[in-house]
Image (tube, helix red, strand yellow):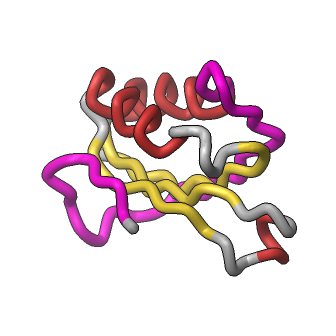
Amino acid sequence: MKQVHLYVKGDVIGVGFRAWSKIQAKLKGITGWARNVHDDSHRFGLQGGIEIVAQGEESALGDYVAKIKEGSPISRVDDVEILVEDVKEAFDNFEIVK
């Protein structure tokens, strides 16, 4: 199992991006979480962004990251910062964190 930490920048808050990312995760067998970030202007700019931790098999993660970069039909993804991490805690499902 592999893990990636994604920082998604663009018009992704208030457009259902987290719910869409959860659906994409379920379709690809990915576990982890997604949350809105409003207080990290250094990383996301003034409009904020979405932080995602995703776990799964390497090929499924690659497909998932490609979908995240593409974005949902009503979002605009400008950039995705990707960090590959060691798995410290295995997740059972994909959650939206408030």
Q: Quadrant of residue 29?
A: top left
Which quadrant of the structure image shows residue 42? bottom right
38 up-or-down from 18: above or below: below
Asked if residue 54 is positioned above or below residue 45 in the image, the reply reads above
Left or right of 49? Residue 92 is left
- The residue located at (14%, 52%) in the rendering is 92
Q: Could you say which is closer to the camera, residue 59 or residue 14?
A: 14
Find residue 53 and report its horizontal and vertical position in percent: 44, 56
- Residue pictured at 64% horizontal, 51% vertical: 13
Measured from the top left, where is residue 87 in percent x and y? 33, 63
For residue 87, above or below residue 31: below
**The C terminus - image quarter:** bottom left
In front of the other: 29 or 21: 21
Give yes or no for residue 90 being in the magenta stretch.
yes
The residue segment tinted magenta is: 70-97
Residue 93 drawn above or below residue 83: above
Tell me: 22 left or right of 11.
left
Q: Hey, which residue is sitting farthest bottom in the picture?
A: 39
Apparent side of residue 32 relative to residue 47 in the rendered image (left or right): left
Quadrant of residue 19 within the rendered picture: top left
Magenta stretch holds residue 71: yes
Q: Is residue 82 left or right of residue 95?
A: right
The extreme left residue here reads 92
Closest to the observer: 3 or 44? 44
Seen at 58% across and 53% down, the residue is: 6
Rendered location of residue 64, percent (x, y): 47, 29
Quarter in which the N terminus is drawn: top left
Residue 81 image position (x, y, % from top left): 71, 53
Q: Residue at x 85, y 68 (%)?
A: 46
